[in-house]
Image (spheres, grey):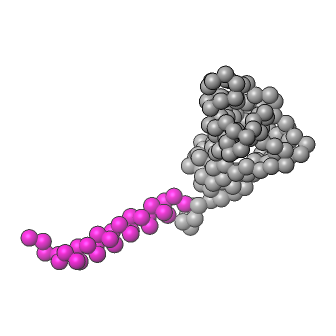
Amino acid sequence: MSLVPPRLAQLLGIGALAVVLAGSLVACGNDDGNRDSRVITVTHPATPDPTYVDLGDPGASVGDQRIWNFAGEDEDGNAVDTNWVMTTTAVDYPDTNVETRNTLGVLTWGDLSDSLLLEGVGHYPGEGAVLVPASTLARAIIGGTGQFAGATGWVDSTHLEDGTWTHVFHVES
């Protein structure tokens, strides 16, 4: 037989849960309970031709992959090693001569211990490997390592008219 009335036990349980959740939120942030956020800009010249792997039916098809590795730099002049794997997930969708592709990108600094991972879906010209110039695509930051461990947020990737690229990371950690 419980000495605590059922309604009081329920309220105490809810109160305990609230304390645990509040503590978890503070533990995820800095000393004042807020997550750190910063903006990091990475630029690079026009991308080299990708390694193209025709994995689906011959020709443009679901499963085809494009793979890149190239150098970039952040706004402080630090070298950024850039790796991309882009997989075609739909052909002639949402329109004729448009491919839907999923991209996984890993950008690393220094000795590869600091990295940001991004992932997202975009629509690309069926005949091209990259976004149309003068277009921007938002993707999710899905994690990181080193100084970026636990990172979330998003990145806006812009293919500029001159063929160069700018990736603006909105990082929360």
Let me know if residue 26 is in the magenta part.
yes
Say above or below: 114 vs 138. above
**Horizontal and vertical percent for residue 97?**
75, 38
Question: 75 left or right of 33?
Answer: right
- Residue at horizontal 34%, vertical 72%? 15
Question: 168 left or right of 13?
Answer: right
Residue 80 visible in the snapshot: no
Pick the residue in front: 139 or 23: 139
- Indicate the quadrant containing the C terminus: top left, top right, bottom left or bottom right: bottom right
Please identify the dominant SS of the magenta region: helix
User: Residue 101, located in which quarter of the rendered image?
Assistant: top right
Say above or below: 148 vs 63. below
**Horizontal and vertical percent for residue 29?**
55, 60
- Residue at horizontal 44%, vertical 67%? 22
Residue extending farthest to the right is: 162
- Residue at horizontal 26%, vertical 73%? 10
Question: 55 left or right of 95?
Answer: left
Let me know if residue 141 is in the magenta part.
no
Magenta residues (range) = 1-29
Residue 21 visible in the snapshot: yes
- Indicate the quadrant containing the N terminus: top left, top right, bottom left or bottom right: bottom left
**Horizontal and vertical percent for residue 120?**
64, 45
Say above or below: 68 vs 76. above
- Residue at horizontal 81%, vertical 30%? 48
Residue extending farthest to the left is: 1
User: Residue 165, located in which quarter of the rendered image?
Assistant: top right
Pick the residue in front: 58 or 23: 58
